[in-house]
Amino acid sequence: MFGQHLIDKGLITDEQLIKALDLQVHSRVWLGRLAFEEELLDLDQVVEILEQQDATKMLFGEVAVQLGHLTTTQRDDLLAQQDQRSPRLGQLLVEQGLVPIEVLEEELEEYESSSVEAANSQALR
């Protein structure tokens, strides 16, 4: 995980990573809101899904598909949008002044290249 890489390099602390990850989770756009904005669900359907979700502890997208309000393709598209619209860990660390953008870009490049090398090494085994 990239956050662990930054800790290992001494650029951030465990506590700073936890705080940034918590902020990332709380900054996430809700799937129901996206579906409503995309006019895939109306307000009554969102409320119905939320009530069912609360009762079953299932994920919003799973409940929406189970109730027939969304197809699996629509759910997957919304999840991709949710991911795209959510702030990246690095972005949050830069915004909080914990890591300069230049350092973040260098570390991200290093992390990605080491991840590719590890994957290639694993594939050869």
Image: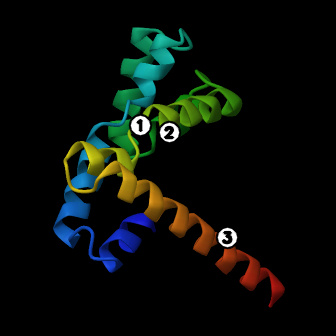
Whole-percent x, y for residue 75 in the image:
60, 31
| Residue nearest the observer in this picture, 49 or 89 | 89
* Direction from residue 125 to residue 28 in the image, left or right: left
Q: Dot 3: few (<14), some (14–19), or many (≥20) neighbours within 10 Å? A: few
Write down the residue under mark 2.
83
- Going by the picture, which residue comes out furthest to the right? 124
Tell me the mark number nearer the camera, choosing from 3 and 2: 3
Q: Secondary structure at mark 3?
A: helix
* Direction from residue 15 to residue 34 in the image, left or right: right
Q: Quadrant of residue 43?
A: top left
Q: Dot 1: few (<14), some (14–19), or many (≥20) neighbours within 10 Å? A: some
Q: Is residue 66 something that shows in the picture?
A: no
Q: Are marks 2 and 1 in contact (CB under 8 Å)?
A: yes
Q: Quadrant of the N terminus?
A: bottom left
Q: Which mark is residue 100?
A: none
* Direction from residue 104 to residue 99 in the image, left or right: left
Residue type pointed to by label 1: Ser
Residue type pointed to by label 2: Asp
Q: CA distance from mark 3 to mark 1?
A: 24 Å
Q: CA distance from mark 3 to mark 2?
A: 22 Å
Whole-percent x, y for residue 18 in the image:
23, 62
Q: Quadrant of the C terminus?
A: bottom right
Q: Along the polypeptide, which appears first: circle 3 or circle 1?
A: 1
